[in-house]
Amino acid sequence: MSRWIKFLLALLLGLATGLFYGWVVSPVEFVDTTPEFLSPDYEADYVLMAAEAYAASTDLAPALNALALLSPQPPANIILEALVYAQGAGYAHSDLALMQSLWRALKSVQPGGTP
Amino acid sequence: MNRGRQWLEVILGLLIGLSLGLAISWWIAPNGRLDPSPAALRPEFKDEYRLLIAWAYHASGDLGRARVRLSLLKDGDPVQPLLDQAIRLRNGEAQSNIYPWTSEQSIYMLSLLANAIQEASSPQAFAATETLLPPRQTPTNTSAPFVLLSQEVICEPATPENLVRFNVLDNTGQPLAGVGILAKWEQGQEIFYTGLKPGQGSGYADFYMVSGTLYSIKVLPSSAPLSGLSSPECTGEDGTLFHGGYLLVFQQP
């Protein structure tokens, strides 16, 4: 067996061991994160919560504050992303309507985009 | 020598492969099943998340959804963290970036959700679920007005002077957390909530009077006000005078 083949086999064995260790034995644990790092499904639910609270109070300020914790993007864009995810994930029409309602309210503050 | 060099190359290959594998699995492409969840949030952001859950619950009345959301925080018991957060807000030990100017309302929202979960966990609630009765969409403390069930003067030297203790019950006699009580006097007013001293029971709240001041007490949102309440004068067994307190029990009819 040539030296290069031995080296390559050792490299692949090391790679497999490293992947097994990092993915299965000791995977990355997320601790002490900020809402910015939430995965898209949790982000969408977070936006829905903000939309639910807005629907009852029609006070935009808390919704804006909540969205600011989620991302530095413009708030309407955050809702658009969440809406796209929510539609794909099969959210109820009533929930989508709440998010669209918040988006429309924010659109008046920050024009642009289409839900 | 040549054989030794070949082993060195194999070990080098192993080490490079191992390093690459760890770099990929820890930094470049971490395990996809381990997406950051609300449980991984820093404590202050967990507070914000919990508060948003409480406000959303107040808006939708969907307790099942609120419970699922709270479970994402992996706090264990969902009630105690809600009450603890309400206490921290009340004591000024925490503040919200989402609702910075409405801490009284936020305390109410947190207590309201804690109360609803407690109620849903009670044997009566289980019975209702088993018989498929429609779930209650709004907690009891937002509906029928409370009535004064009993007013007892407490003259015990061992208890703090001028302390008014409240016990607020629902229409089945169960203690109710998250009920607001308004105390008014000539120079001001204060709102406080039941359930923020869990060791005393979820329907408990207390308030200190100032001697010589007249108070009007109202259980929110709409009980008849109890007016003319002032610190009672008591006489101890040895003849010494001291100020007593009250135990007031309110219930929903």
Image: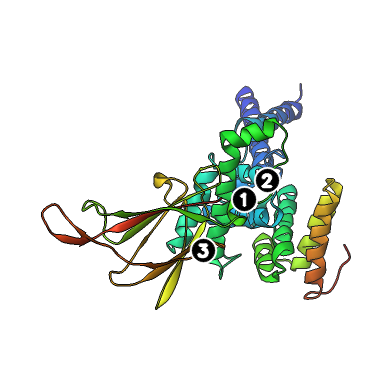
Instruction: Name the element at disc 1.
Output: loop
What type is the residue that disc 3 sits on? Ala
Spot occupied by residue B48 in the image (x, y as percentages of width and height): 58, 57
- Give the labeled residue for mark 2: B136
Q: Residue at x 62, y 37 (%)?
A: B125
Comes first in the chain, label 3 or label 1: 1
Q: How many marks?
A: 3
In this view, the residue farthest toward the right is: A114
- Give the labeled residue for mark 1: B139
State the CA–CA distance, disc 3 to disc 2: 25 Å
Mark 3 in CB contact with mark 2 (< 8 angstroms): no
Spot occupied by residue B226 in the image (x, y as percentages of width and height): 44, 64
Tag nearer the camera, 3 or 2: 3
Mark 2 in CB contact with mark 1 (< 8 angstroms): yes
Question: Which quadrant of the figure contains the N terminus of chain B?
Answer: top right
State the CA–CA distance, disc 3 to disc 1: 20 Å
Q: Is residue B79 above or below residue B222?
A: above
Tag nearer the camera, 3 or 1: 3
| Residue B99 image-quadrant placement | bottom right
Q: Nearer the viewer, residue A96 or A83?
A: A96
What type is the residue that disc 1 sits on? Pro
Q: Residue at x 81, y 64 (%)?
A: A101
